[in-house]
Image (cartoon, helix red, strand yellow):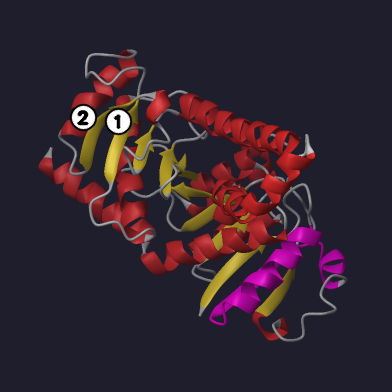
């Protein structure tokens, strides 16, 4: 039975949505156990109608909460009775298999690095969300954990992304691309110019540079980027999706004829919206630490929390961290 430690107080809609998401996840997966960590009184008040899963749900009181206003590293060092710190230590010590939080991204990253620990050979863990590309999903790594990068970091991102897509998405030979302003090897800034030859000799299926316009064109299963560029891509795609659906809705309601057409096309639009909806993905895995850690979106609703928990379970069952260690070892031997 997989055991996930959930930060019940993390996120804009906590603890209501985090608790509801945990209950949803438990009802879907009968081989799942969850520890809800946070304010015991607040959490227990939300557990009145979950007798069917209550035996697989544990509440652990935490007297401290790390917020987005706290300095992440300092908070992880001083707020030892917070869900982030206690959750990372639980995974490190084998008392839990994975950790999920919709709270502070910085604290989750710092907790993963300093309490759970990095995989040997990984300099910088990376956040790697799954993004829609029209056909399925691609992994964008990094999306904000590392704003300033070295070529070696991007090489490690490629290795981690390859391992994740193999273990969790079941791809035999995932295509790995490098985000750049042109397709030619000589294009780009100094960072990507130096990274390109590194990826060519890395044991991954490197398919070359990926331009911004081709990010969603199903040209790569893993797109490697520094955290600054990756975060721009992530936020831009979220914004475009919201704007596009708003424009479509406005046009569809503009006349009786359009309303009739919208009624007929409603099932298709619902499917498209589902594919573009971040809540279906759940969150971004933190790759490069010694365990399964998923950072859910701060505004996650209950379903998004449940999907983030499912993603953590898939990482545990797929053995992502051991796969990264193995791939990294092969790379170092080949160099």
Where is residue 86? Give x, y as percent.
63, 59
Are dots 1 and 2 in contact, CB under 8 Å? yes
310 or 106, which is in the foreground?
310
Residue most extreme to the front: 257
- Quadrant of the rendered structure where residue 258 is? top right
Q: Label 1: which residue?
A: 152
Left or right position of 21 against 149: right
Left or right position of 32 against 79: left
Residue 64 against residue 312 in the figure, above or below: above
Residue 322 against residue 287 in the figure, above or below: below
- Quadrant location, the C terminus: top left
Q: Label 2: which residue?
A: 198
Residue 31 falls within the magenta-colored stretch: yes
Q: Earlier in the sequence, mark 1 or mark 2?
A: 1
- Quadrant of the rendered structure where residue 156 is? top left
Residue most extreme to the left: 334
Residue 125 falls within the magenta-colored stretch: no
Q: CA distance from mark 1 to mark 2?
A: 8 Å
Residue 134 visible somewhere in the drawing: yes
Residue 67 visible somewhere in the drawing: no
Residue 227 against residue 25 in the figure, above or below: above
Magenta-highlighted stretch: main secondary structure? helix
Residue 319 against residue 278 in the figure, above or below: below
Question: What residue appears at the point 34 percent right and 46 percent down from the top-left corner?
Answer: 160
For the record, the magenta segment spans 15-44
Where is residue 138? Give x, y as percent.
41, 44
Question: What residue appears at the point 79 percent right and 52 percent down from the top-left corner?
Answer: 13
180 or 55, which is in the foreground?
180
Q: What secondary structure is found at the residue carrying circle 2?
A: helix
């Amino acid at each position: 039975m997989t055991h996930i430690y959930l930060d019940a107080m993390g996120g804009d809609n906590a603890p209501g949505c985090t608790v509801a998401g945990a209950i949803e996840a438990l009802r879907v997966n009968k081989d799942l156990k969850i520890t809800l960590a946070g304010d015991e009184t607040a959490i227990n008040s939300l557990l009145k109608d979950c007798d069917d899963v209550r035996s697989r749900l544990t509440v652990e009181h935490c007297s401290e909460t790390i917020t987005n206003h706290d300095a992440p590293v300092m908070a992880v060092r001083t707020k030892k009775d917070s869900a982030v710190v206690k959750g990372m230590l639980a995974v490190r010590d084998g008392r839990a298999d994975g950790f999920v939080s919709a709270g502070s991204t910085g604290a989750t990253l710092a907790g993963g690095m300093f309490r759970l620990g990095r995989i040997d050979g990984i300099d910088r863990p990376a956040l790697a969300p799954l993004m829609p590309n029209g056909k399925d999903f691609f992994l964008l790594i990094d999306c904000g954990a590392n704003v300033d990068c070295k070529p070696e970091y991007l090489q490690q991102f490629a290795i981690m992304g390859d391992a994740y897509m193999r273990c969790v998405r079941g791809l035999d030979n995932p295509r790995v691309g490098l985000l750049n302003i042109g397709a030619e090897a000589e294009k780009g800034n100094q960072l990507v110019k130096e990274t390109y030859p590194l990826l060519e000799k890395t044991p991954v299926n490197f398919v070359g540079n990926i331009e911004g316009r081709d990010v969603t064109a199903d040209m790569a299963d893993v797109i490697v980027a520094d955290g600054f560029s990756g975060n721009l891509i992530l936020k831009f795609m979220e914004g475009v999706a919201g704007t596009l659906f708003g424009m479509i809705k406005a046009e569809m309601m503009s006349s009786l004829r359009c309303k009739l057409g919208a009624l007929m096309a409603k099932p298709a639009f619902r499917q498209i919206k589902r594919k573009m909806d971040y809540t279906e993905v759940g969150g971004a895995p933190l790759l490069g630490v010694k365990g399964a850690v998923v950072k859910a979106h701060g505004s996650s609703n209950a379903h998004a929390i449940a999907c983030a928990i499912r993603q953590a379970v898939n990482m545990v069952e797929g053995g992502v961290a051991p796969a990264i260690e193995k791939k990294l070892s092969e790379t170092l031997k080949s160099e």
